[in-house]
Image (cartoon, helix red, strand yellow):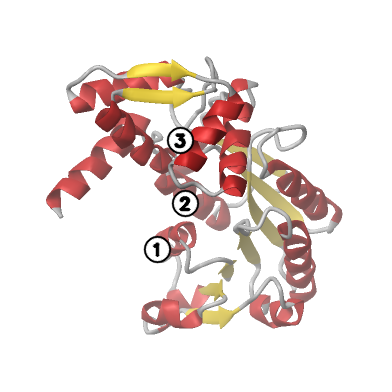
Amino acid sequence: MAVAVTGASGHLGRKVADLLLEQLDPSQLILLTRTPDALASYAERGIVVRRADFDEPATLVEAFSGADRALLISALDFERRTGQHRAAIEAAKTAGVRRVVYTSIPEPQGNPAAASPSHYATELGARESGLAWTFLRNNLYADFQVPVVAQAIASGQLVTSACDGRVAYVSRDDCAAAAAAVLVQNGHERKAYDITGPQAIGPQNVAALAAELGGRPVEVVPVDDHALVAGMIENGVPDAVARILLSFVVAAREGFLDSVSSAVEDLTGKSPTSLRDVVTAARQDAASM
């Protein structure tokens, strides 16, 4: 069995590759990236590293050659990636890949998060491809809450329009572990898993965590969506990015991100990491530098 991982030079791709190396021989791993030089240390260990660019479909069939299973890590451009993903799925099929694993989002159909339409379209493309498929519907990364908590500690405020909306934040490490497990195990064909943390967290919970870690009160400041976007722009966030970030806040507020599943433990045998532990570890790492 050979496993291909797209986007292998990114944060998630590297973590998945490292976990796969604990279970597979290096010759069974194919790492695909637009920048092969970034993975030179993996190539030196006997791992196959190939250039693959979603914008150059002609490169993809050869890139997937020899792989039985492939992890398709979603690309970053929400506007263009549906076509990119579908081209990659078709190339994987042509190359002889039998199962594709795709990193998606909870409840992609109708979810107001800006990433959702392309996730849903990609899932449809995988279903229609004739390949066996597995969808890992990763919740929002707990890792991205580290600067949010730090800002709340510094200012004493958590500004949000999420109201009581909750998110089952999941660590990137747990997402990688779930992906690696699905890639090496059998029996996950035509299944979709919600990959979540151990509990759904709302703004009051995040503020309480910041207050505990910072040793000072943190107030939740409710604002409307317009004010939230304006505040982000005022603090240097580009307008387009601010509106994308708002879409995830709206998704939380409307209940699209609050489902908690046992998938991480079911797939990996380990309990998922809490938001508290992710933030605490990041703060300890920063303090040791």
Please tell me which of labels 2 and 1 falls first in the chain: 1
Horizontal and vertical percent for residue 175?
48, 46
Q: Earlier in the sequence, mark 1 or mark 3?
A: 1
Name of the residue lying farthest toward the left = 288
Q: Which of these two is toward me, 224 or 56?
A: 224
Looking at the rendered structure, the kind of residue marked 1 is Asp
Q: Quadrant of residue 282?
A: top left
Q: CA distance from mark 2 to mark 1?
A: 9 Å
Image location (x, y in percent) of residue 89:
75, 64
* Quarter of the rendering occupied by the N terminus: bottom right
For the point 39% across and 24% down, the residue is 158
Work out whether residue 59 or residue 218 is closer to the camera in this orientation and state it.
Answer: 218
For label 1, the residue is: 18
Question: Comparing marks 3 and 2, which lies closer to the viewer?
Answer: 2
Disc 2 and disc 1 in contact, CB within 8 angstroms: yes
Label 2 sits on residue: 176
Circle 3 packing at 10 Å, graded few (<14), some (14-19), many (20+), is some
From the viewer's perspective, is 224 left or right of 112? left
Residue 110 placement, left or right of 146: right
Helix, strand or loop at label 1? It is helix
Say how many tags the image has: 3
Q: Residue furthest front?
A: 234
Q: Which residue is tagged 3?
A: 265
Corner quadrant of residue 2: bottom right
